[in-house]
Image: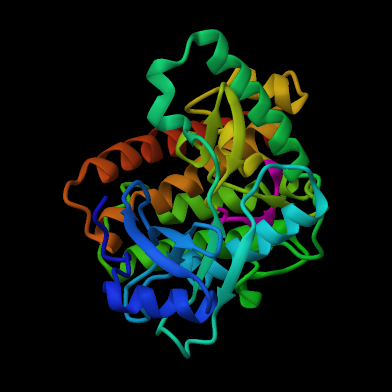
């Protein structure tokens, strides 16, 4: 996927970064990995050191959405935290540099996970195996959400953190609209109505008392599988301290019964479902803007996301007025 935020580097620069991180290693291969949408990534083959993946953050002058600022720091923090506190399969961070002395953007090297993304091999898997993997995803996701934090919000942005989840989430929504206004992106929903509904929904957000680690991007492309088992979970850059219902497995437009079973719940309560709708809307507010911020080659992502945004915005409005006084 071509994207404006991908910070493509020359072979000479990549070799310099490799030598800085692994002074005694010899590089015998560099391959760009093209599945990602935001950061550029390279598979690095080394002698005298483990072969690894190099990820490089966007250029400093690349236009990014508010929530995307400093998210490489969030990714490294999440990976190290999960590695230390759980048995969840996550790549080890081998070297992280945010000093900007070797490159004008942060970067890190991590170990290579075995297997392939679930997205790439899904058609080759039986329905029974797919069900087992999604159930296992639910179990792992429950463990991720078992890691507690001290404040809600994005780890790399202290200004977007707080102890009141409704306040933090409201700020996240405001910034999403500000980002859209910056590039004159038509989100197809009423900002005024949305914030009236958000104010009316305060009580359901007050149920969320404890910030927990949320991966927030655990779709099939970020689940690695080998021999019908999960071998790793990748792309932690969008992780944040939040409500577990933000996780992909709880999105209402792709209900996943196997995920629910693995997570250990039968169904969402009425108020939980309403919060899940809010996270549908927030997610689609952001995804609807990716085409413009990253300058994708087609508008397919915008059409898909803005369509879901309108549908879930309308469902959210109806649901709020049916269950809140």
Q: Residue furthest bottom?
A: 101
| Left or right of residue 2, residue 119 in this image | right
Q: How many marks?
A: 0
The answer to whether residue 323 shows anywhere in this view is no
Q: Residue 50 location, x and y as percent? A: 55, 59
Q: Residue at x 28, y 72 (%)?
A: 11
Residue 240 magenta: yes
Residue 67 magenta: no
Q: Quadrant of the C terminus?
A: top right
Q: Residue at x 56, y 44 (%)?
A: 279
Figure quadrant of residue 75? bottom right
- Residue in the foreground of this view, choosing between 223 and 157: 223
Image: magenta residue range: 236-244
Q: Residue 6 location, x and y as percent? A: 32, 64
Residue 296, above or below 60: above
Q: Residue 91 location, x and y as percent? A: 61, 52
């Amino acid at each position: 996927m071509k994207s404006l935020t991908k910070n493509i580097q020359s072979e000479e620069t990549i070799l310099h970064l490799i030598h800085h991180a692994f002074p005694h290693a010899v590089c015998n291969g560099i391959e760009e990995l093209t599945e990602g949408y935001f950061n550029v990534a390279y598979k690095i083959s080394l002698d005298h050191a483990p072969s690894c993946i190099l990820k490089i953050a966007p250029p400093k002058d690349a236009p990014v959405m508010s929530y995307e600022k400093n998210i490489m720091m969030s990714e490294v923090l999440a990976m190290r935290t999960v590695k230390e506190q759980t048995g969840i399969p996550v790549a080890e961070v081998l070297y992280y540099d945010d000093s900007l002395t070797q490159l004008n953007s942060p970067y890190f090297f991590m170990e290579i996970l075995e297997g392939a993304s679930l997205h790439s091999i899904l058609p080759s898997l039986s329905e029974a195996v797919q069900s087992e993997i999604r159930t296992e995803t639910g179990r792992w996701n429950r463990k991720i959400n078992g890691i507690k934090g001290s404040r809600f919000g994005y780890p790399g942005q202290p200004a977007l953190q707080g102890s009141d989840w409704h306040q933090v989430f409201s700020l996240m929504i405001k910034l999403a609209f500000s980002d859209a206004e910056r590039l004159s992106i038509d989100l197809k929903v009423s900002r005024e109505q949305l914030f009236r509904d958000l104010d009316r929904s305060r009580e359901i957000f007050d149920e969320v008392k404890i910030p927990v680690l949320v991966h927030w991007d655990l779709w099939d492309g970020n689940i690695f599988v080998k021999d019908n088992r999960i071998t790793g979970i990748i792309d932690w850059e969008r992780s944040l301290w939040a409500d577990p219902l933000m996780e992909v497995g709880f999105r209402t437009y792709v209900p996943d019964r196997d995920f629910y079973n693995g997570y250990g719940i039968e169904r969402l309560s009425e108020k939980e479902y309403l919060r899940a709708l809010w996270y549908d809307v927030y997610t689609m507010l952001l995804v609807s803007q990716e085409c413009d911020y990253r300058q994708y080659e087609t508008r397919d992502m915008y059409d898909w996301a803005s369509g879901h945004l309108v549908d879930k915005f309308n469902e959210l409005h109806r649901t709020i007025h049916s269950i809140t006084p």
